[in-house]
Image (cartoon, grey):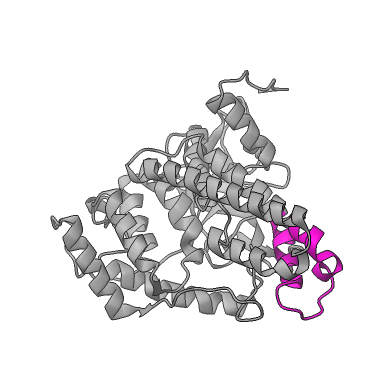
Amino acid sequence: MSSQQSTVSPSELITEEEFRAQALAFLEANAEPRPPEKVEWGVGSDSVELFADKTPEQELEDLEVSRTWRAKLYDGGFGWITGPVAYGGRGLPGSYQSIFNSLESNFKTPSQGPFGIGLGMVAPTIAAHATEDVKHKYLKSMYRGDIVGCQLFSEPSSGSDLASLQTKAERDGDEWVINGQKVWTSGAQFSDIGEIICRTDPSLPKHKGLTGFVVNMKAPGVEVRPLRQMTGGTSFNEVFFNNVKIPDDHRLGDVNGGWTVALTTLMNERAAIGGSGAGIIGVNKTFELLMQLGEFYKDDPIARQQVANLYIHMKTAHFTSMRAMAKIKAGQLPGPEMSLGKLSLTNNLQKIGEFVSHVLGPKLVADTGEWGTYSWASLLLGTPGIRVAGGTDEVMKNIIGERVLGLPKEPKANN
């Protein structure tokens, strides 16, 4: 863990204009301007993958590049702009983060993908539910990129029905002993810590007998095994816990209060997944690539209408998501409306897949080397994973129906 200090005082009072000038100076000194992005048929990358297909060596190389930039951001005063000063943040309003994001989009900077789950889901949960010691131990290090976090919720028999999980945590004095298995854990292979939900009292109704913890992913008894997905990559893992010890001060919230902890994480997860609105690969690039397929459907008026319809849906989802994200930046907790963004994302991805399947036909499944054709297969193969991540589409519909529309709750088979 680095002891290097930020060059900008966290408690410094600063106007938005002064902050903008500082941020621009930092970016100009540390990054190259991003040239205007224009998708041209046959030029550059035609990748639309949702999950990267990388070797372990490539993952570690990319992680180090991302980590170096993350540290530079933090040390420059831009790594945790809205975070509480007491835990290493700068304590500025969400509008300042928006200013920085807008400026950074004009520069070529390394992907921060390896930190997405840790900073988007785990860190907010630690900030909300951890002990003071744990907050001080991990939050600054996470935002500086010194450590990476992952989320350990799903199990082989407990996916969307998270409350039925079976991984056990048994108390032994000032420690807890963990035994069980988690699955579909993104980034576990290079994570330092994880947020895990365990069953601590099997005698209670399933929602009430759970407890959350921060677990050391390098601790004895933790085994991470990669899972090969149908896209070809290994973005996900299964993780086994064999008598793994966790100190009680690494507990999140109250004993048997883990359901509240899990909901905090899930709401942030849906915000992170659905936040792009139009899709993980972005509104503009997606639409430009669809337009580049014009040679395949230029004489098909129905296909041209489908493209227009896709663009409308993507833009609508994007603007709806921007409205929800504005609430979060204003300091409000993400709510059930984030399920709309997540559901819109997967619906749009499915619509895109159906369209390119219709337009490309066999070119989608046979790699002829032709630019902009077979590459779409990775999007089709990755879409089912997005439909499951953060709660299945069916769960999202239930949340929207019950918590947004006020419809009666779905009957439960048991507690």
The secondary structure making up most of the magenta span is: helix
**Image point 62% across, 75% down: which residue?**
56
Farthest top residue in view? 408
Whether 284 is drawn above or below 390: the answer is below
The answer to which of 222 and 264 lies nearer the viewer is: 264
Whether 120 is drawn above or below 143: the answer is above
**Image point 61% across, 27% down: which residue?**
401
Q: Position of residue 310 (x, y in %)?
A: 64, 52
Residue interval drawn in magenta: 354-383
The answer to which of 355 and 80 lies nearer the viewer is: 355
Residue 360 is one of the magenta-drawn residues: yes
Number of marks in picture: 0
Q: Is residue 72 left or right of residue 350?
A: left
The answer to which of 86 and 240 lies nearer the viewer is: 86
Whether 293 is drawn above or below 300: the answer is below
Can residue 176 be seen?
A: no
- Identify the image quadrant of residue 162: top right
Q: Position of residue 379 (x, y in %)?
A: 69, 62
Q: Position of residue 96 (x, y in %)?
A: 27, 55
Can residue 247 be seen?
A: yes
Q: Quadrant of the N terminus?
A: bottom left
Farthest left residue in view? 13
- Identify the image quadrant of residue 396: top right
Q: Position of residue 386 (x, y in %)?
A: 65, 52
Q: Quadrant of the C terminus?
A: top right
Residue 121 is one of the magenta-drawn residues: no
